[in-house]
Amino acid sequence: MHVTNVKPASAELGHPLSSSYPPGVAPSYGGDLESSLPIVLAEEELRPPLAALRYDPDVIAAEYGQKTFRVWGRALSIFLPFLFFGLRLWVDRFTGNQNSQQKQAIHLREMLTRLGPAFIKIGQALSTRPDLVPPDYLEELTKLQDQLPPFPNEIAFQFIEEELGDRPEVIYAELSALPIAAASLGQVYKGKLKTGETVAVKVQRPGLAQNIALDMYILRGLAVWAMKNIKRVKSDLIAITDELATRIFEELDYNQEGRNAERFAELYGHMPEIYVPQIYWQYTGRRVLTMEWITGTKLTQLDEIKAQGIDPTHLIDLGVQCSLRQLLESGFFHADPHPGNLLAMADGRLAYLDFGMMSEIKPYQRYGLIEAIVHLVNRDFEGLAQDYVNLGFLSPTTDLAPIIPALAEVFNDALGASVAEINIKSITDKLSGLMYDYPFQVPAFFALIIRSLVTLEGIAIKVDPDFKVLSKAYPYVAKRLLTDPAPELRLSLRDLLFKDGSFRWNRLENLLKNARSNQDYDLDLAIDQAADFLFSERGDFIRTNLVNEIIKGLDTIGQTVWHNLTYGLRERAGLTVERPAIPSENQQTLDHLKRVWNILRETRGFDQNKVLLLVPRLLARPETQKMGQQVVGGLAQRVAVRLLREFLLASQPDVQDSRQTPLPALPAARI
């Protein structure tokens, strides 16, 4: 929210008490924003708000349920501007007027600004989607991130005094004369503490609780009406509305935002090149937040970033990797990663700001998302359908038989030829089409996840039009599958690698290749955990199938050595012989083993000696000895069957007597 390149010329550090505005009227805020209407504040908005705020739909309904005229007045003030805006667009299209797009974009931005925080956030989300929004609209909507009209200094300073107990000039050594940036819920001043630290002082806009509560009451009423009267609506719109409202109300408590920032720093601040600013609690209250000042550049300002010698695509990749850990590892995630909240620092680090809108997902939901990504990438639509059940998109009683082919038809088009072509927008678009034909519903927890991912992908697309979030995510998912000991992921790994009793070598190769490209992939840890799981009770199924694969591999090697030896001896004896062919199935197994070994050798951190040291530890385990006995027995069976078959075939006459019954073929050993 506080960036160096949006600072107005008048915003030098110093005590701002010389600045004055008419009571209740905000100044215009530079450039194109001068056309924005001033914000007129009602007297009731100047009163100190409640000490604590929590979203409670029943309390809000009791407050506004009897205020029919106020509710309808607000509803009309929302819908009429959108109606007139739509009519203006229709007239322009009907008359072929293409030159008014910039004016319409300015009008849309001003309209969303007047409608308040909820609609500003909609505009912020749209400002990150260059694939959806025309350039003129994109440029205007981007201003909603941190260039909104500010409210008067007098009100901001009153809030500082009420929250921190004294006037700003007493508390801070310096404070900018005007806000450096202004967003939907607050505005930021640049200041300096008396101990010398440069800080950002964020002060909340007045009257937010009343305005947001009324908007949420109207939106919730629409959700109730839609669920009762529109049969095609299957999702719980009320729960989704309540989830969104809960997060917005949490943003109104800057103490909570400070706690969110510190928790975020604890979970993800240790990641290389990720930075989280410090919170100064002595100078923080419910409506005032003082945090470390971050000098940086918004990720969408590519020329400025490149001029500093920083690769913007690398920063986006950092953001994706950090988001993956938020969503799939710890579960505590930033639900509003728009460009105003992500800054490129001069040293190449990515700084996160504004921790008001955070959310959390439970462990089973995180594992469900990982499994869904794996099934999607590998086009296992039967598994994907079950994932939707586990995540709450489908009821456990839903008949999946017709849904599985529908998923295959839809996603095969969306996915293209490889995982590199997958993007979040194509997945959500295709899934939204399915929801009308089948009993899908969007769980409330998933709405903010989609918002976070789509926003992040929008930033990435602006930096690199070919950037695909999921293609960057799969190496992390592959690493988790190979190294995470959680039972859910162990079972997912088993289901991925084995199907109908057959080992899918191509899936293992794909996992190993993707995992090695993840910076945090620890091959030693993967090998140790794989060994521990293999010899656990849960790994019994894998051991059984692995024995068959070892038998096939050793049999292939043995046949290769024997054929080469006999071929060489016969050739030396002057006999004309053809080099015997190895059965294709066995040759494929051998080729897979070679490729897996080569992948391991090329993986960062591979040490052949460590692998050899692991062998004695594995040989000492009783499960290994049992597997060895099974391998020896299986090999002996295969050799015996092969010799018996070759002996019988060799002893058969070339021409059988018509009265003889041909010998039945012996069944091959099951492998």
Image (cartoon, rainbow, N blue to C red):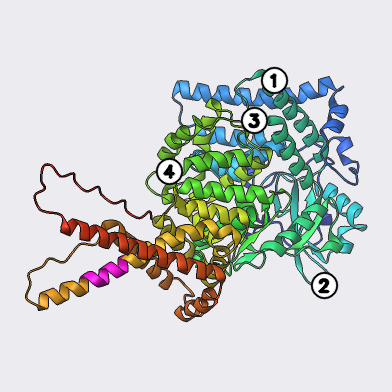
Q: Quadrant of residue 258?
A: bottom right
Q: Residues within 10 Å of mark 2 (few under 14, many from 20)?
A: few
Residue nearest the observer in this picture, 631 or 223: 631
Mark 3 lies on a secondary structure that is loop
Please state which amino acid type lies under the numbered disc 4. Leu
Whether pointer 3 and pointer 2 mark residues with C-beta atoms closer than 8 Å, the reply is no
Front tag of 2 and 1? 1
Disc on the earlier residue, 2 or 1: 2
- What segment carries the magenta color? 556-563
Q: Is residue 610 magenta?
A: no
Rounded to the nearest whole Å, what is the CA distance between mark 3 and mark 4? 25 Å
Mark drawn on residue 310? none
Rounded to the nearest whole Å, what is the CA distance between mark 3 and mark 2? 53 Å
Where's residue 321, x and y in %?
A: 56, 59
Mark 4 lies on a secondary structure that is helix
Whether pointer 3 and pointer 1 mark residues with C-beta atoms closer than 8 Å, the reply is no
Front tag of 4 and 2? 4
Disc on the earlier residue, 3 or 4: 3
User: Mark 3 — residue?
Assistant: 235
Please state which amino acid type lies under the numbered disc 1. Lys
Where's residue 259, x and y in %?
A: 79, 57
Q: Residue at x 78, y 29 (%)?
A: 217
Whether pointer 1 and pointer 4 mark residues with C-beta atoms closer than 8 Å, the reply is no
Please state which amino acid type lies under the numbered disc 3. Ser
